[in-house]
Amino acid sequence: MRKVLVTGGCGYIGAHTIVDLIDHGFEVISVDNNSRSTTALLDGIERITGHKIKNYKVDLCNFDDTGAVFQENRDMVGIIHFAAYKTVPESVARPLLYFHNNLESLINVLRCVRDYKIPNFVFSSSCSVYGNTVALPVAEDTPLGEAQSPYARTKQMGEQIIFDYARAYSGNNVLLRYFNPVGAHPSIEIGELPLGKPDNLVPVITQTAAGKLPEMKVWGDDYNTRDGSGIRDYIHVMDIANAHTRALQYLIEGKNASNYEIFNLGIGKGVSVLEAIRAFEKVSGEKLNYTMGPRRPGDVEAIYADNTRARQLLGWEPRYNIEDMMRTAWQWELHLKENNSLS
Ligand code: WQD
């Protein structure tokens, strides 16, 4: 069976991707030091798929420990690299932590991919590499803007590291730029487990509705958008997951034209904060307690994807709409509330 190593496999997107990989016949192992996660999502994966996922509790910033995992699994067909810190405000407060953790781990993984001749590498990137772009929808060849945070800069630098690595060494590399991943697996056995107070819109909405947060602020009502609030391209985490499986299959089947390819992962349409709130209220039946507040520093006004390349070359089709995203996010929040141990 084709074996894949998922770094950050205990995290939100990593765990959902493991489910999709198993559904498509891959054998999966995880590497995750659980600095920002627990193994709770691996238990959920086992309940969904019947597969117990082995996790190597290894810090990818330790080259020798990382190499030992590759030494023990030389038969891998690919690596999907999610492991990174991703909290924008934390990256502003602690930039050196982000540069060290996100780049040192990437470099160590690439050194092992090279040394153990693993043929296929998929990198978790982010639409935040575009910065304050204006040309919408955003295509992959859009010139990258000024990173709005050290987190975004680690993704820009990570992409550049892989670019130079791809020119120097053999092996195939795909970079996936996520727009705004939200929601939970339809089984509600896995979902997002934000550590501490969330910054992202959807966990803030669901935690406010669940009474974990007293109220929610809409950051900005004076943007030049149809209702004054910020616009984003929300995409269900299982659509993001499936794109990873397809990207790996694309490389395994030798369909890639070059050994460095980039794909945007968004549904290709923008949804405003107020529209997202209305979708949540419609599917949950809850009235959300929110007030309008000032713009949040670093926020872009609007961004959504041109996803033509992923559709045409990966055969990828986003399946979930904003109401599906809100419904599964809310059901997951209620699941967490009932099973207090996970929250
Ligand atoms: C979305 C919209 C906010 C919270 C970030 C990272 C990106 C990726 C996804 C990691 C904006 C508004 C939010 C709130 C609000 N992270 N909002 N009230 O900033 O687009 O992207 O998360 O991979 O790299 O940059 O996502 O969910 O924080 O904000 O009004 O309490 O919701 O202003 O318009 P963002 P977000």
Image: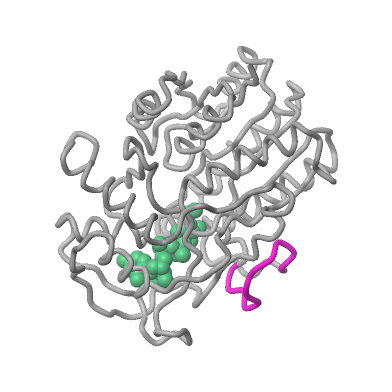
Figure quadrant, ligand 1 = bottom left
Look at 47% across and 84% down and name the residue there: 225
Q: Is residue 165 magenta?
A: no
In this picture, residue 6 sits left or right of residue 308: left
Look at 50% across and 29% down and name the residue there: 59
Q: Is residue 135 magenta?
A: yes
Q: Position of residue 331 (x, y in %)?
A: 26, 48
Q: Position of residue 182 (x, y in %)?
A: 41, 53
Q: Position of residue 108 (x, y in %)?
A: 64, 32
Look at 42% across and 74% down and name the residue there: 272
Query: Along the line of sight, which residue is nearer the eye, 181 or 325?
Result: 325
Query: Along the line of sight, which residue is nearer the eye, 317 or 246?
Result: 317
Q: Position of residue 308 (x, y in %)?
A: 69, 60
User: Where does the magenta region start and end?
Assistant: 131-142
In this picture, residue 35 sits left or right of residue 162: left
Look at 33% across and 67% down and name the residue there: 279
Q: Main secondary structure of the magenta part?
A: loop
Which corner quadrant holds the C terminus?
top left
Residue 75, image quadrant? top right
Res. 61 visible in picture: no
Which corner quadrant holds the N terminus?
top right
- Considering only vertical position in the picture, is 322 above or below 299? above
In this picture, residue 5 sits left or right of residue 293: right
Res. 224 visible in picture: yes
